[in-house]
Image (cartoon, rainbow, N blue to C red):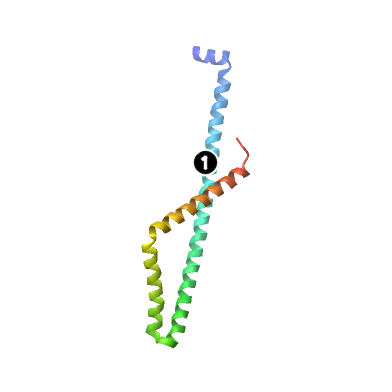
């Protein structure tokens, strides 16, 4: 009873109510921002997966085409062996240089994400 009387006397009960509403509103805002970011990430991942699928199909068909073109000159098995050898060579290069490739890719991804973060921050109004 004394607590309620003191809160009313100093008008702190309204202040506490406003503070509580403010905190609840900020929590809701953070939830919406997280949902928005999650939707953006899922959309980008879906697009990357679709592009990867089509790129894989293109590489597959071009590889078959190249193998059949080479088959006219070196035989069917030779054409496919050359194309397979080229892919094996690429795999070996990637394995040998995986550390430096990883560092370069990580640096580029961080730079892109950092740039996107600053671009998005410029679009929002300050709190």
Task: Please say whether residue 105 is visible from this viewpoint.
Answer: yes
Query: Which residue appears at 52% of the width and 50% of the height?
Result: 113
Mark 1, other Cα within 10 Å: few <14 / some 14–19 / many ≥20: few
Identify whether 116 is placed above or below 91.
Answer: above
Of the 4 image quadrants, the one containing the C terminus is top right
Camera-side residue: 60 or 35?
60
In the image, taking residue 72 as reference, residue 12 lies left or right, namely right
Query: Which residue appears at 52% of the width and 60% of the height?
Result: 47
Answer with the quarter of the image where residue 68 lies: bottom left
The residue that disc 1 covers is 31
- Disc tally is 1
Camera-side residue: 104 or 120?
104
Identify whether 43 is placed above or below 27.
Answer: below
Query: Which residue appears at 40% of the width and 79% of the height?
Result: 82
Dot 1: element: helix
Task: Please say whether residue 1 is visible from this viewpoint.
Answer: no
């Amino acid at each position: 009873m004394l607590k309620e009387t003191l809160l009313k006397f100093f008008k702190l009960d309204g202040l506490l109510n406003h503070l509580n509403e403010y905190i609840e509103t900020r929590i809701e805002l953070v939830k919406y921002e997280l949902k928005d970011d999650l939707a953006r990430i899922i959309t980008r991942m879906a697009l990357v997966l679709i592009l990867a699928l089509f790129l894989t199909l293109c590489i597959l068909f071009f590889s078959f085409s190249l193998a059949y073109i080479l088959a006219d000159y070196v035989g069917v098995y030779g054409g496919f062996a050359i194309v397979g050898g080229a892919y094996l060579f690429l795999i070996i290069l990637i394995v040998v240089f995986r550390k430096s490739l990883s560092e370069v890719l990580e640096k580029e991804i961080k730079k892109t994400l950092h740039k996107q973060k600053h671009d998005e921050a410029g679009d929002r109004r300050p709190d």
